[in-house]
Amino acid sequence: MHATRLACCLGLVYVSWTVWCVLMISVGAPFDQPIPRAVFRFAAFMVPALVYMWSSEPKDLLRLRLTTNWRSGLTVGIVVAGAWAMLHATQNFRLPNAAHAWVNVITLSPIAEEILFRCIVLERLLTWTSASRAIILSAVLFSLIHLPWWWISGQKPAAEIAQLLGVMFAYGVVFGILYHRTRSIWASLLPHSMNNLIAESLVH
């Protein structure tokens, strides 16, 4: 039963986001506008996630695991995010001035992705298989959610897409390890958000 529910949850996320990507390319406005895109992407992740949590673990729906091991999670998250920022300290940065970058990429996307792929997918996989396999599989699923836009938009060649999927997989493994060791969303959420902030702030 849990496997079916989880498959339906993930299927709905992947299908709805892929359809939206098609609409952004084939129709354009309002689907490709920053705010509608941010709102839909957040809803496409969170609505199936909330339904899954409500049907499987109602007690976690109210807290969304934000209070689980929050002290150790915040400590680890702040340390890792700070270390990641220091590793990039010598690069040329300019903080983004677009509101949608802060709302979507830096805030909403990490929240939605961490709740779905770590608090739900990884947490469930950990009850079915070993930690290493669960982390790897959740990282694969995390990387694949980035594929629809890269592929459908045609903005990146296949070789670059493959490389980016590898990068997303590596991030997924790191975030998965942080979550698994602390069992707190904060341990993976803060580094995830910091990584996105760095990516948005790099001056090319």
Image (cartoon, rainbow, N blue to C red):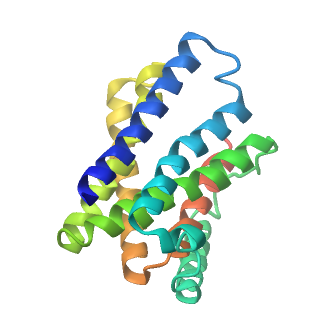
Q: Is residue 22 left or right of residue 174?
A: right
Residue found at x 58% / y 20%:
24
Q: Residue farthest to the top?
A: 26
Quarter of the image for residue 36 reads top right
Q: Residue at x 33, y 49 (%)?
A: 141
The answer to whether residue 1 is left or right of residue 87 is: left
x, y percent for residue 196: 59, 53
Residue 129 to residue 138: above or below: below
Give 164 or 103, whichever is nearer the viewer.
103
Residue 1, quarter of the rendered image: bottom left
| 146 left or right of 38 in image | left
Instruction: From the viewer's side, name the closer residue of 151 and 54.
Output: 54
* Residue 203 pos. (x, y %): 68, 43
Residue 185 picture location, percent across and down: 51, 72
Q: How many marks?
A: 0
Is any atom of residue 167 visible in this view?
Answer: no
Q: Residue 17 location in percent, x, y?
A: 48, 33
Residue in the picture at 47% in, 29% down: 149
Q: Is residue 59 above or below residue 154?
A: below
Classify 31 as above or below 85: above
Asked whether residue 25 is in view, the answer is: yes
**In the rendered image, which quarter contains the C terminus?**
top right
Left or right: 130 as drawn, with respect to 85: left
Residue at the (59%, 50%) spot, across then down: 109
